[in-house]
Amino acid sequence: GVLLALGLGTGVWYINAGQFTKVPNLLGKTEAQAKSDLSAAGLGVKRVDRKFSDTFDRGTVMDSDPESGKRIRGNGAVALTVSRGPEVVVVPDVTGRPLEEAKAELVKSGLAPGMVTQAFSQDVAQGSVVSTNPPGGQKRSPDTAVALVVSKGRPVQVTSVVGRPLDQARAALQDLGLKVETAAEEVNSPFPAGTVANQSIGAGSQAATGDTVTLTVSKGPRQIPVPNVTGQEADVARKTLEGAGFKVKVERPLISFGNTVDAQSVPGGQSAPEGSTIVLRTKGL
């Protein structure tokens, strides 16, 4: 009877002891690692509180309830307190560092990477940080957003290649460190066929090394019908031709018999390149 009682008692103790486990050591571990350790011990997370701390790094466990080493029922849950880092943080100086590296440093310091804008820089390499707002060294609350200005590299002064043969234009822009693409469709323009009619980044503009300039190739000027203005007053004839898309030059003889157009360099009804000059001659000797 005594042995039976002892046996029963041992069984009860074993069952009860087996229902408990120790809270693992969580202090100083990252939130993710602490959750993983709890899961491995068969425990869950009741909640996560966040508090400022000058002692524990941001994102690490500074306290737990129950505390590490305490016994807790199996499948129980532990409340974690995670550090938000110091109540005031110093903005790190990330100027000159690659953007992603700078962002990581801000996060590590307890700050948030903010809006990213780009600017040319003579000194800072393309893709690296030129400046921040607030600047490095200033104190801010944790999670403050820090805006970053990233270098586009040294500015390139774009030259005009309009009117130049396509191959020459491409070479000139590539020599500046720019990429060149050609528009799919050619267009009519005052420039000869095969030359550049338009460039997507205008002459005198600033561009970054590696920027792409798209060139549109000219098909040459459109051929359009020339109106017949013979017999019209010169001023009326000029307006008619300019309205049709031509330039006009009026020649008057030394001895003039009025202001009526006697002849035009391209007869009415024939075609001429759009934008070309039609010469008008008034009556006289």
Image (tube, helix red, strand yellow):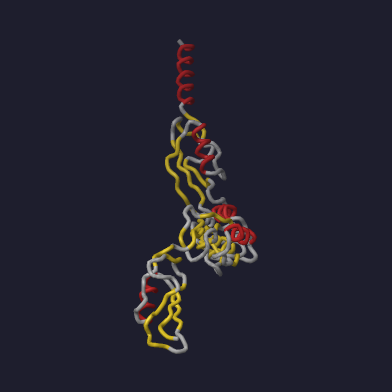
Going by the picture, which residue comes out furthest to the bottom?
Answer: 255
Quadrant position of residue 154 = bottom right
Residue in view at x 58 percent, y 56 percent: 179
Above or below residue 195? Residue 252 is below
Above or below residue 255? Residue 44 is above
Report x, y in % for residue 271.
42, 65
Residue in view at x 63 percent, y 58 percent: 171
Residue in view at x 48 percent, y 47 percent: 81
Report x, y in % for residue 163.
55, 65
Quadrant position of residue 159 = bottom right
Residue in view at x 47 percent, y 22 percent: 13
Q: Quadrant of the N terminus?
A: top left
Report x, y in % for residue 165.
58, 60
Q: Can residue 96 be seen at all in this image of the molecule?
A: no
Q: Can residue 255 be seen at all in this image of the molecule?
A: yes
Above or below residue 63? Residue 113 is below
Report x, y in % for residue 260.
37, 82
Is 277 or 79 nearer to us in this picture?
Answer: 277
Is 243 or 52 nearer to us in this picture?
Answer: 243
Q: Quadrant of the C terminus?
A: bottom left
Quadrant position of residue 227 = bottom left
